[in-house]
Image (cartoon, coloured by chain):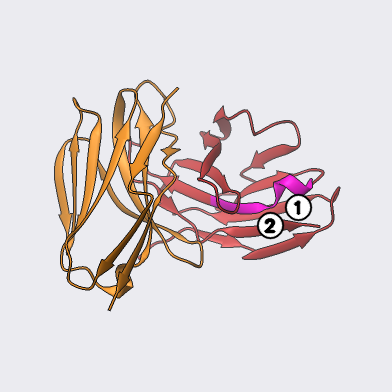
Chain colours: A orange, B red
Amino acid sequence: KNEVEQSPQNLTAQEGEFITINCSYSVGISALHWLQQHPGGGIVSLFMLSSGKKKHGRLIATINIQEKHSSLHITASHPRDSAVYICAAVPIGGSNYKLTFGKGTLLTVNP
Amino acid sequence: EPEVTQTPSHQVTQMGQEVILRCVPISNHLYFYWYRQILGQKVEFLVSFYNNEISEKSEIFDDQFSVERPDGSNFTLKIRSTKLEDSAMYFCASSEGHRGAQQQFFGPGTRLTVL
């Protein structure tokens, strides 16, 4: 059974700080998603990656498949980045690409 | 930009009643999913749907649940006899599904409250 673990569970930062959120998983995966969930509940897909690194604006996601670990970095954090960040894995072998989710990291960025 | 839409945004129902949650996936997508999130808990997979049939379902997706693609655009989740523990946020998602895992795009969710 694939477990997806995130750390930290809660993170408070000051505006401008560099943020790192970590995700580890227990079985082989074909891809990993990083998602953002705002207080209203909606989920936005940030990245899907299966190797290396992806960058979008101030967000950077990296993954090391062999070490079963991924990180999400936010540079120059801003209060509008406050949200729950969730990683979700696609286990190898499935034909339908269903996601197994972590519990999420609640990020609060203070001005 | 294309997006997944869901209706209603909030549904309140009495225990034992049937509810239908509706989703319109992105038009050229082939894989469709329902997930749910009980308040304060992590998001859980319910069911995936491809080529007009269920491709996988979780143990949560028992006989009270069903999915349907009644026409070329809608994708519905029916809960036949709602229970208090069905109260949750239900998310629909879709992906292109060509050649390996693709990015999944989520709808805004339907908050279901069972009284």
Q: Residue B40 location, x and y as percent?
A: 56, 52
Write the residue at 69% across / 38% down: B66
Front residue (pair A2, B16): A2
Q: In this figure, which residue is indicated by the disc labeled 1? A: B19
Write the residue at 76% across / 37% down: B64
Please say whether residue A35 is visible from this viewpoint.
yes
Q: In this figure, which residue is indicated by the disc labeled 2? A: B112
Disc 1 or disc 2, which is closer to the eye?
2
Front residue (pair A109, B49): A109
Magenta region, residue range: B83-91
In the structure shown, which secondary structural element does the residue marked by tag 2 occupy?
A: strand
Q: Is residue A2 above or below residue B109?
A: above
Q: Residue B110 location, x and y as percent?
A: 61, 59
Q: Amino acid at mark 1?
A: Val
Front residue (pair B75, A34): A34
Q: Chain under label 1?
A: B
- Along the polypeptide, which appears first: circle 1 or circle 2? 1
Write the residue at 54% across / 52% down: B91
Quadrant of the rendered image containing residue B96:
top left
Q: Is residue A86 above or below residue A96?
A: below
In the structure shown, which secondary structural element does the residue marked by tag 1 occupy?
A: strand
